[in-house]
Amino acid sequence: MALAVFSQTHRYKPTAIEASRRYQSLLGIVQARIGQVGRCISNEADLDACLLAIFFMARYETVMFWPTEHFSPVSLALMQDWSHHDGAMAVLKTWFHSSDRKPATFLVKHTRRGLVKCALLRNLPLPDWLLDGSPFGEVGLELGYDRLIVRVVNLHYDMKSLLACAEFNITEAETLNDEANRLLEELEDWVAKFPKAWSFRRHDFPNFGPWPRKHFFSPILYSFDKPAYGAAWALYFAAKILTSSISLRLLDFVHDDASSISLHRHQWLDSSQAFREAIESLAATVPCCLGVFTVCDSVNSEYNQSMTVASTEKPIPPHLANLLIWCLTLPSIIPVMEQRQQAWFRSELAELGRLTGTGILQTAETGQWGSL
């Protein structure tokens, strides 16, 4: 994996060749042993080794991915081979249904999180056994978020299925929109439980333009005491963007029915406002999470602030970039985004791809990026 990332970040072909050789070797080993997965799940170390091998193979594919000249996907589901993710799903399912199932390991928890994201990108419904995060190690605030996001993923699948029907069912659309509204309310309840230390401060720097620019979308910026706190808020903003976009797409079709335009107009305005606010807030979170600016307050901090902006030429640590990749992926693929906003998110995502050596992310601003 290190060879693959090095080959991407330094554009060094010999390491890419060696990485490919080792990948093929690992692939052969896993394929030979995959039939023994039933035995390995009873041993924690063997289970983790199996999941880790699958993770690195899938990661290798995303790192080394680069589309052909005529590659033009209509959705993210077509951008890569998902066979490794299907393999991870099979391993987790076997573990979950095992009669002597051991407590979830760290890798079990994070493998499931990855599969939930993959289900959204591939527009697949989540199986019932995967819905409850508690058997997979989710607790506390993370479990609260998990319970919401699995519903959002399945709601997105239901929305896409409904819009694909030859005859649009307005009653069903209203039912799904009601669920979207409930989820938006429950997301507010969830974020209200954040510790006070996680709070952010809003800053307005109108003279710092032009806007948008690299890492800065507008003069409105949020600062956090730690990047990890900003990452938690970014998850909330991204989930709000996705959920409100589902509502907007449903209401756009409901509006085609003349008899219901006035009835749903206020709902569309509410969802549109929630959507815009979440986009602006996520963009305002990016600079602090990436460590490209700091705010120095004077004694009278409310009225007298100064900002120090780090050089955008200074490399951003990959661990900070990884905090935001998923959150920036969502606005980069949602169809109802404004072009100017989506172009900025795609540009940021491509930059994070270059920083982390992830080839598939670097296609985000090439015109070959898919949509949700």
Image: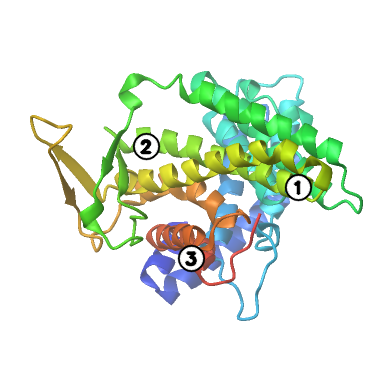
Tell me the residue at 62%/54% (across/down): 336
Q: Is residue 23 positioned above or below 238 on the image?
A: below
Frontmost of labels 2 and 3 is 2
Q: Is residue 63 positioned above or below 31 on the image?
A: below
The mark nearer the N terminus, 2 or 3, is 2
Q: Position of residue 352 (x, y in %)?
A: 41, 57
Tell me the residue at 33%/20% (across/down): 196
Quarter of the rendering containing residue 177:
top right
Q: CA distance from mark 1 to mark 2?
A: 36 Å
Tell me the residue at 65%/58% (across/down): 76
Q: CA distance from mark 3 to mark 1?
A: 37 Å
Q: Please tell me whether mark 1 sits on a helix, a strand or a loop.
A: loop
Does the image show residue 74?
yes
Does the image show residue 38?
no
- The residue singled out by tag 3 in the image is 362
- The residue singled out by tag 2 in the image is 230
Q: Amino acid at mark 1?
A: His
Q: CA distance from mark 2 to mark 3?
A: 23 Å
Along the line of sight, the residue nearer the viewer: 178 or 75: 178
Q: Please tell me whether mark 3 sits on a helix, a strand or a loop.
A: helix
Along the line of sight, the residue nearer the viewer: 268 or 340: 268
- Quadrant that contains the C terminus: bottom right
CB of mark 3 within 8 Å of CB of mark 1? no
- The residue singled out by tag 1 in the image is 255
CB of mark 1 within 8 Å of CB of mark 2? no
Q: Amino acid at mark 2?
A: Gly
Q: Is residue 106 positioned above or below 122 on the image?
A: above
